[in-house]
Amino acid sequence: NNHKDNSRGGLIVLEGLDRSGKTSQSSRLLSHLEGQGLSVESWRFPDRTTCVGNMISSYLTNNSQLDDRTVHLLFSANRWEKRSLMESKLRSGTTLIVDRYSYSGVAFSSAKGLDIDWCKAPEAGLLAPDLVVYLDIPPEKAAERGGYGGERYEQLEFQKKVSQYYNVLCDPTWKIIDACLPVDVVEKQLKEFVMNSIAICQKGKPLSQLWS
Ligand code: FDM
């Protein structure tokens, strides 16, 4: 039947401030979905393994200086260089759990003072997520968790600005989870949102594009 032909994996994006728990929730979610027998991969942006990703990494660790617009476009290019692989994985039925995506791109660069529409422009045409989950934590609480690793953006005042821009970007389709809840509770809520979204993609929901 028709359904099976268009069946695909889900593009699941986790967003949130540094120390909101995205990375540990991604790995818990990955194990859970694998345990269900689903085809699933965990991705993250920036993907520091590519040439572009290397430039970004060296910038984030303060080993190089780049103009704000230049680095913004590198983050975007880092998603564009993965777009075709992303599409083929999804079409072949693999669900992708992605730790940060275009929303991080826009929120972090806007927080530096760049125009938000300018920041969104190069993201237009990337694949639109099927689900965006925002792990919501007050910047002060995130800072208390410690473990800010000393990378360029890991400072309370900056994270406060980022959180304001996440608020601007947030739309009613986003699922918000209170990241101050116990990890197991966050995990349970996340699983529920994700399982629902995957079920819809399996039924043949069309892929769509961001901001175009
Ligand atoms: N970041 C991440 C951006 O500024 N733009 C982007 O497009 C993306 C994906 O890079 F501070 C920022 C967010 C964070 C830093 O991210 C590195 P990880 O998740 O700590 O690797």
Image (spheres, rainbow, N blue to C red):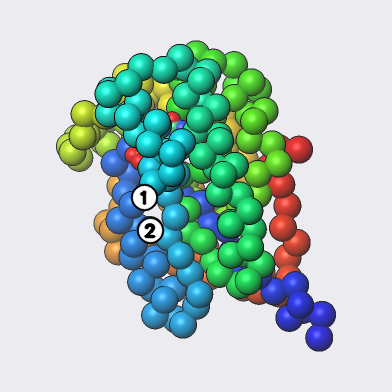
- Which element type, helix, strand or loop, lies under badge 1? helix
Q: Residue at x 21, y 34 (%)?
A: 149
Q: CB of residue at label 2: within 8 Å of ligand 1?
A: no
Q: Is residue 87 visible?
A: yes
Q: In the rendered image, which quarter contains the C terminus?
A: top right
Q: Residue at x 33, y 52 (%)?
A: 23
- Label 1 crowd (10 A; few <14 / some 14-19 / many >=20): many
Spot the residue most to the right.
Answer: 2
Spot the residue most to the front.
Answer: 51
Q: Whole-percent x and y of residue 4?
A: 73, 81
Residue highlighted by disc 2: 26
Picture disc at residue 71:
none
Q: Residue at x 47, y 53 (%)?
A: 98
Q: Whole-percent x and y of residue 165?
A: 51, 27
Q: Is residue 135 visible?
A: no
Q: Is residue 191 above or below residue 44?
A: below
Q: Amino acid at mark 1?
A: Lys
Q: In front here: 144 or 22?
A: 22
**CA–CA distance in space, label 1 to label 2:** 6 Å
Q: In front here: 66 or 17?
A: 66
Q: Are marks 1 and 2 in contact (CB under 8 Å)?
A: yes
Q: Amino acid at mark 2?
A: Ser
Q: In the rendered image, which quarter contains the N terminus?
A: bottom right
Residue highlighted by disc 1: 22
Q: CB of residue at label 1: within 8 Å of ligand 1?
A: yes
Horizontal side of residue 47 vs 142, given as left or right: right
